[in-house]
Amino acid sequence: MKTFLNLVICEHCDSVYRRGVPAPGEVAHCAQCAAVLYRASRLDVEQWLALTAAAVVAFMIANICPVVRISLQGQHNEAALWQSVAALAHGAAAPIAVPMALCVILVPLMQIVLLVWVLPFARVGRRAPGFAPAMRILVALRPWSMVEVGLLGILVATIKLSSFVEVAPGAGIWATAALTVLLIVIAKRDVQGLWALTERAAPGPMAPA
């Protein structure tokens, strides 16, 4: 039985192409609809894994350390990233609390966990158990990761509050900024190359006895 994992299908018009090896900076486009098929990556698997580990640290700091610290008349209040999202559940903004939690907390967490699972195996040319479902989930989650939206909202709220109370940025806001950049690099890059990278080590069908 032959595999065809070196083929790529256009997501827009379903045209099928044989996947090549693009030079650094090159982008492969569909000949029918001009959509982007894949891009050359400047990161190898080891660098990808290292940046994913950094994203784990940034995610933990953003959800443990306070994003901002608010002081008013000797009283202080502070909140980490998840607490900032949870605060939306109270008041007029309650309807957007769930999608905000998904886009800022849960989806980035799932992306990081899946990459932490598949990349160590890919580093040695193997496929992690559940590799195919993990790849499909990573592609499906990509449009829903919006930590940058949460960061922008925090910055806007901080600027507005600074006119009334004393607002000081915490370690969490810097971790959130770092997480935003890291997720753009590690979770929004083309993951299809992992199929070709691990193709030779993929288990094939058992020979008949």
Image (cartoon, grey):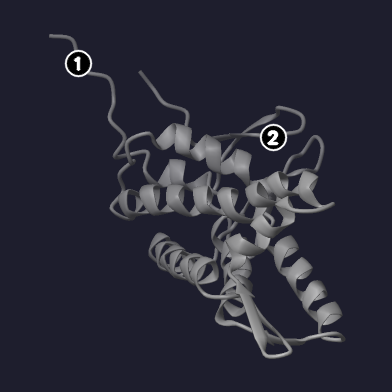
Query: Residue 3: which quarter of the image?
Result: top left
Residue pushed farthest left? Answer: 209
**In the image, residue 185 lies at what x, y percent?**
58, 64
Query: Would residue 110 appear left or right of 208 to someone viewing this image?
Result: right
The crowding category of the residue bearing disc 1, from other C-alpha atoms within 10 Å (few below 14, some 14 to 19, many at least 20), is few
- The residue tagged 1 is 207
Q: Residue at x 74, y 70 (%)?
A: 154
**Viewer-proximal residue among 13 and 102:** 102
User: Which residue is depicted at the point 79% across and 44% down?
Assistant: 95
How far across and how far down the image is residue 65, in percent?
52, 75
Q: Secondary structure at mark 2?
A: loop
Q: Quadrant of the N terminus?
A: top left
Q: Identify the amino acid type marked 2.
A: Cys
Q: Closest to the observer: 91 or 125?
A: 91
Q: Examine the image and state in which quarter residue 150 appears.
A: bottom right
**Location of residue 10 in the rendering, given as x and y in whole percent from the top left corner:** 69, 34
Q: Residue at x 59, y 58 (%)?
A: 40
Say which quarter of the image contains residue 2. Answer: top left
115 lies above or below 163: above
**Label 1 amino acid?**
Ala
Residue 189 visible in the shown view: no
Quarter of the rendering occupied by the C terminus: top left
Crowd around label 2: few <14 · some 14–19 · many ≥20 (10 Å): some
According to the picture, the residue beneath numbered tag 2 turns out to be: 10
Q: Which mark is residue 18?
A: none
Name the foreground residue: 121 vs 6. Answer: 121
- The answer to whether residue 163 of the structure is visible from this angle is yes
Q: Mark 1 falls on what kind of element?
A: loop
CA gap between label 2 and label 1 equals 34 Å
